[in-house]
Structure formats: structure tokens, C-alpha cells
Amino acid sequence: MHFACRANVLLALSAFAVATNGPGGAEHSPTRSRITEAAAADHIDPTVLPFISTAFASIEAIQSPVVAANNTINASATRVDTHVHLVPDWYRALVPVTGGNPTPEWDVQSHLQFMADNSIRHSFASVSSPGSGAYPGDETKSVALARVLNEWSAALVKTYPDRFSFFAVVPLPYVQAAITEVDYALSCLGAAGVIRLTNHEGFCLGNPTFTPFFDFLNSRNSSREVIFVHPNEPHVHQNHTLTSANPTLYPPGAIEFYFETARTFMDLTVSQTLANFTKLRYAVAHVGGSFPSVIDRFMRNYPALAAPSTELYKSRAGPTYNHQVQGLLAYGVPASQLIFGSDWPYGPPLSYLDSLAAIVDAPFLSPEDKEGVFGGNAGVLFGA
Ligand SMILES: *[C@@H]1O[C@H](CO)[C@@H](O)[C@H](O)[C@H]1NC(C)=O
Ligand SMILES: *[C@@H]1O[C@H](CO)[C@@H](O)[C@H](O)[C@H]1NC(C)=O
Ligand SMILES: *[C@@H]1O[C@H](CO)[C@@H](O)[C@H](O)[C@H]1NC(C)=O
Ligand SMILES: *[C@@H]1O[C@H](CO)[C@@H](O)[C@H](O)[C@H]1NC(C)=O
Ligand SMILES: *[C@@H]1O[C@H](CO)[C@@H](O)[C@H](O)[C@H]1NC(C)=O
């Protein structure tokens, strides 16, 4: 479909003979060759990652027919989970702490079991923060990590197409590399959208250096480009050094994530990124964080700008968010804009059942609203 994609595929096919020239048989499997050649076509060298052999082996493992056959299904499951994370072992080793808490373990069988237990038919999955930001200041490794995470996610989706879709990681703040990556992920790997963090190496999403990225996505003209905005730990640039900016004693995931979401959506609003690039759709983690409650106040500082439309989609997660969902409805966000997200496996253990039950039992949502939250609204968002 995309010229860039066809070129990559052709290169990948013709690469087998070349790639087997190196030392070691298993080192040069078809999977490894295809990925390496497609990356080379985009000037990416995955071998800069010290764990690349492990990563390639895990991509091969997840495509094995034995794994594919072991697909725990709840036949009556109908729900769509739009906020759920993938954690390859090698990524967890690289990022042992997320938002101040230990990065959780993940494996596909546990994920499928979680889906079956909670009546989830399909998961739109992503790699959580920091994603490719695990190598701050190192463009070469950030770009390689984004590519390998996307190849790994695409392999999972290929093995279980009915169960998973994925949001692509993009190696921002390196904007040209991020454009290359998102084009490859959407055109060649079948990504359902892109995950962006509330800050990439300390830069909020309205930063002018990111405008070419939004412009590129918008100019694909699909009207369906979904950007899942997920919190990251706050960072600031001090004296040309990137520094963690958590002003409290608490893990940033506990409270800073909410303010991060507000900060970045304020930035997207004031920079007019939301207003200018009208073909993009947003899914916002954690029911919009603290953004909805600060809109009225900060918009007073910008009388010439329109407040952001309630067209923004929100996802929800966590045990007590039902109160927050109720609050959001009071801000004029229609129930048709709410989509379910569990945040598995990053949420506190045992929170998922309570969280689901709170929405299943919520008196402020009609049965039709709930059907939308648990599936129909995500179908509209993703054009299903
Ligand atoms: C199949 O899945 C179950 C859990 O659902 C797990 O215990 C078992 O090890 C898996 N088998 C294989 C071959 O992956
Ligand atoms: C399967 O989903 C249904 C609802 O669709 C639920 O009631 C049931 O508990 C689930 N079964 C299992 C084994 O989790
Ligand atoms: C999208 O539409 C604009 C304006 O009509 C056009 O200039 C651009 O080439 C289109 N992009 C693609 C990828 O088709
Ligand atoms: C900024 O960093 C340089 C070295 O990187 C150091 O010499 C200087 O003292 C720093 N300035 C402040 C205000 O911290
Ligand atoms: C959006 O458009 C306005 C007016 O045309 C312009 O001033 C602003 O810089 C644009 N912002 C972005 C992020 O493109």
C-alpha cells in the first residue's frame, strides 16, 4: 500500500541469501533477517541494543505454532480493552521501575487468561512509559528500541490477530526518526495507532519540534489515526541536563501521572495542535487525568482560543475511577466518548475486578452507555 512499505518488504525478501553470510546459523533466522533488513532500509541498526539476540529469540518464540495454539478463549467475551500493556522480559530487564513502582511481569498466557476471566474479547495493547525513552539522549538506541518493540508487538498481533492490536512506539523527541517509525508501523506492521507519552525526554506534546510529526500523521488523511496519550514521569531540562522532576516523596505513578496528562493537553490546546490537525483521534489514559478539572481555569488565560472539544476520547482504569467517570460526565463529556481500559498488568493487584464491577454496577450509566464503554465506543474510535 505504501511505497516505503513495499520497498521494505522486497528488500526483506531478497535479503535472506545475503544475511546468511554471517557467522552462526540461528543468529540469522528468516525473522532476524527480515527485521534487520527492513530496519537497515530505514537506517536503523537493531544490533546496537545489547539484548538484541534475546529480543529476536522472543519474537521467534511468540510466533511459534505451539504458542499460537494455546489460545485461552472465553467464547462469550465481548469487551474491548483499550489500555493494557505488553512487557517483553528484555524490556522489563531494561526498565525495572515504571512510575516509581516495579515494572510488572507479563507473558502472553497470563494475558489471555486475564482476558478470559474478565470477558475481554480484544485488547489494544501498548508498551508503557518510558518505551523507547529508556535511552534518554541516545538517538541511535532509542530508534532501535522503538523498532524492536514494534516488531515484537506486531509478531504478537500476527500470532493472535483476533485477540490483540497494538499501538506503535515512536522514538520521540527524534522527530524525523519518529515519522519514519510511525509510517513503517502503520503501513507495514499493521499498528492500530500510536502511543505517545505526556513528555518525551521532558518535552510536552505541544512542543513546536513535534509539529512535523502531527502534520505527517494528519496528512495521511485516514481520519482514523489514533494517538493514545499515556503518562510518563515528569522531567525538566536544567542546565542542559534532563532531570526527573517529581516534587513529592511519592511514586510519580501515584499522582504525577495525572498532572502530566493535564500539562500535555494544556500544551496541545494552547499550541493549537488539537485544533489544527483535525484528522487525528485521541485516546487519553486514566479518564483524562486531571485535565478536565483544570480546563475552565486555564482557558481564562487564553480568551482567543476555543476550549478543546469533548471529542477527545478517554480511557479509564483502576479501582476507584468510577467517581472520576461520573465527574467527567458532569463536564459535558458524553458517555459515548468513554472507552474501557484495564491498565493490566500495571494496576495494583486485585484492582481490576473492583474496577470493572464499579462500572458494571454504576447507576449513572444506562445499560446502553455501558455497552458502549465496554466495546461499541472503541469500535467507533478504531473504525471497526
Ligand atoms: C498454555 O497456557 C497455560 C495457561 O493458560 C500454561 O500454563 C501453559 O504452560 C501453556 N502451554 C504452552 C505450551 O505454552
Ligand atoms: C466469560 O465471560 C462471561 C461474560 O461474558 C463471564 O460471565 C464468565 O465469568 C467468563 N468466564 C470465565 C471462565 O472467565
Ligand atoms: C492528504 O490530503 C492533502 C490535501 O488534500 C494532500 O495534499 C495530501 O497529499 C494527502 N496525503 C496523502 C498521503 O494522500
Ligand atoms: C551547569 O553545568 C556545567 C557543567 O556541565 C557546570 O560547570 C555549571 O556549574 C552548571 N551550572 C549550574 C547553574 O548548575
Ligand atoms: C495552528 O494554527 C495557528 C493558526 O494558523 C498557528 O498560529 C499555530 O502555530 C498552529 N499550531 C500548530 C501546532 O501547528
Image (cartoon, rainbow, N blue to C red):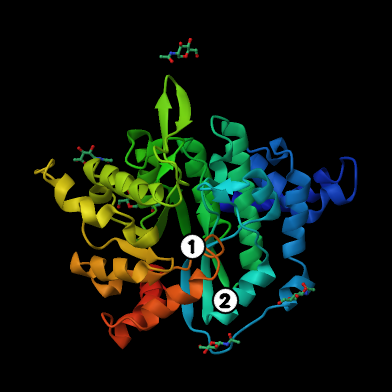
> How many residues crowd around disc 1 within 10 Å: few (fewer than 14), some, or many (20 or more)?
many
Q: Residue at x 25, y 63 (%)?
A: 311
Distance in Å between CA atoms under marks 2 and 1: 19 Å
At label 2, counting other C-alpha atoms closer than 10 Å, the crowd grade (few under 14, some 14-19, many 20 or more) is many
The relative height of residue 121 versus residue 138 in the rendered view (above or below) is below
Kind of residue at badge 1? Ala
- Residue 163 spot, x, y in % from top left: 58, 74
Q: Is residue 144 left or right of residue 190?
A: right
Say the numbered circle drawn on residue 115: 2
**Residue drawn 50% across the image and 72% down it:** 352
Viewer-closest of 104 and 79: 104
* Kind of residue at disc 2: Met
Q: Earlier in the sequence, mark 2 or mark 1?
A: 2
The quarter of the rendered structure image containing the C terminus is: bottom left
Q: In the rendered view, tell whether residue 380 sits above or below residue 101.
A: below
Q: Which residue is mark 1?
A: 192
- Pick the front one: 344 or 86: 344
Residue 2 visible to an observer of this rendering: no
- Residue found farthest to the left: 303
